[in-house]
Image (tube, rainbow, N blue to C red):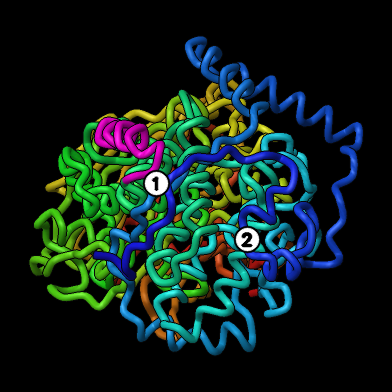
Amino acid sequence: MGGGGEARSPAGSARWSRVGLAPRLVPTSAVSACPGRHRPVCRRHRPGRARPHGAIVSRLAWGLARLRRIHPGEIPARLGQQLWLRLPPAAPDPGPRRRCPLPAPPPEGPRAELGPFLRHGHEVLGSWIEPRHRACFHRDPQARTPWPDRSGHRLDLLGSPQDPRRTWELGRLQHLAWLSAAGPEARPAIEADLSCWIAQHPPGRGLGWASTLEVALRLVSLVQIGGAFPSEPLWRSVAAHAAWLIRHPSVGSSARNHRIAELGALALASEALPDASGARRWRRAAAQLPGALAHQLHPDGVGIEQSTAYLAFVIEWGLLARALGIEGLDPALRRATRFLLHLVDASGEVVSLGDSDDGRVLATTVGPEIGYVRSVIAAAAAVLGLPAPGGERSDDPRHHVLRVPAARPWRDPGSRTFPQGGLTVLRHRDRVVVFDHGPLGEPDLGAHGHADALSVWVHLGSGPLVVGRGTGQYNADPPQRRFARGSRAHPTVVIDGIDQSEPHTHPFLWRSRARARLLSVDPGAGQAIAEHDGYLARLGVVHRRSVALHDDRLVLLDTLEGSGRRHVAIVLPLAPELRARPGPGGIELLSAGQHVTTLVVDPRCRARIVRGGARPGPGWHSPRYGVQIPATTVSLEARPWLPVTLRTELWFCDPGPRDRTALQPPGDLEPGPGV
């Protein structure tokens, strides 16, 4: 099985020392190419400077805010982790048998990408890595500055002006794992880059060891590379990665998708190195995966983190573990997959909710993967015997590695409410409408959720129509992060220009979170009503939204209960390829100059159309992590006295004069910048 034969080495055990480690890990030639244990390949790297006073204060404030969200039972475990971090990292002997228990991807794709990768470089989350810098694993690809050379747990990830996610992406080595399937011609480049990474990152040292999620993902890459090009340093590194995951498990409010990754990686390590001195512990830990995966879901299958991408991510880990023989995963996988199938539109696009950092377990290309969530949904559906989008057969490399069987033909799953996850999906013909009336993220932190209560996403047969504005990035640009997870970036109602949930300056915490509740729902009739209290404490306003999907239109009724006069904005972010222009019957939405739908606006509202302009702002969309492109947002604005009900209609055909339900064309249409 796997991409290569088994290699054998003499038995024995060792423990990493912090002195002279690099020569023990890599051949002498590799050490000379990447000189010094702490000196990266890139000559411009310099040791990190001391933090300024302001960064220390911010870090303390964030630490206190995070501490308040920790359950008392977590404290002993976290104290124990701090003690472990101060001990030399363990390095169990990998044992005589080493193998990759997974099939290698088909070689055609890696071979086609190998030449351009060697000649021109590759993209990493919106930044281009030139060939001469591809082994600069300490460097932020965008800021082009190095991360400090110190123990990973001592790095200030939140107070840094750099975003660690980009550096982590390069250090996951997934591009090397993918290219290792290209054959012998890829071996020199892969071995050189891999030796540099090992030399630059002794266990526990550097950014690559600052997060167990990164350790888990890199372990998968190392095993795949080892299947093609086995070596003693590589397999010792695999054993060191597994030992690190055993010592430093994510606990309590930090577990979530990180814990799923740790357990999935340990399952792989135990199969790749079955005779390693720690393999029994790895197998025992991996047996926790079914329970951990179930804990990651609401009973109805919605991901507890309220993120489509992160749910697909944990499903992929589950599929990997299932392919390795871990039992008991199917009930949780089935619930999660059934939910995600409801979010797939007729074109195969998936409604995107919450954060997405473009993470993946198995690489299917050197660069960014378009359609990752769809790929995982199709794989899970086929494995579980559910109707899969994309047809019966798939040439997806992920499906080959996971041994995905032929799928059942796709059929529309129909409308459904997911009460615990707080989402209602209304489907009619080729239209998909998703109504959010659930919690903001997971219970403890809300880390990857957004302030999007009562948002309504709309997809047609041709793809997305009304969307959220994506993630952008997590660190390095606090204003952008605040906007991307705020209410103005989502298809909901914003009052007086403030977010319905109050974000913390920490990129994954919230000062307050709106509570939404479903008042009534009839999925068969295409109707749902819900409300949230996000503005109640600050403005004395409750927002209630009614959603009704008819044959010819979608009707939104927004009721604001309160008193006084308020500025109200009904925000409708459009998919990037769409444009909006005032027309005789309302606002026409166009794609490539062709009419798609018509937006009929309440006569008390003024329409503001924005595309591009200031950043961060509503005129930009993030289709992938680290990438922003211009996009159109229609904001229907009014200053009514409360209480008030405003009506918005999205017509899927021409709204004739007799069909406008007493609505007149909106007056005072105002285009914004970039229109």
The magenta segment is 275-292
Q: Which mark is residue 482?
A: none
Determine the residue positioned at 50% across, 54% down: 218
Name which residue lies at 62% across and 72% down: 192
- Give 329 or 452, whichever is nearer the viewer: 329
Mark 2 or mark 1, earlier in chain: 2
Please state, as top left, top right, bottom left or bottom right, where the C terminus lies in the image: bottom right
Q: Residue at x 28, y 47 (%)?
A: 318
| Tag 2 and tag 1, C-beta contact below 8 Å | no
Q: Which residue is mark 1?
A: 265
Q: Is residue 299 above or below residue 612?
A: above
**CA distance separating discs 2 and 1:** 23 Å
Could you tell me residue 162's position as x and y percent? 75, 52
Q: Nearer the viewer, residue 515 or 22?
A: 22
Asked if residue 62 lies left or right of residue 232, the reply is right
In the picture as drawn, the residue positioned furthest to the top comes out as: 72
Tell me, for residue 26, which label it has, or none.
2
Q: Residues within 10 Å of mark 1 (few under 14, many from 20)?
A: many
Q: Residue at x 46, y 68 (%)?
A: 177
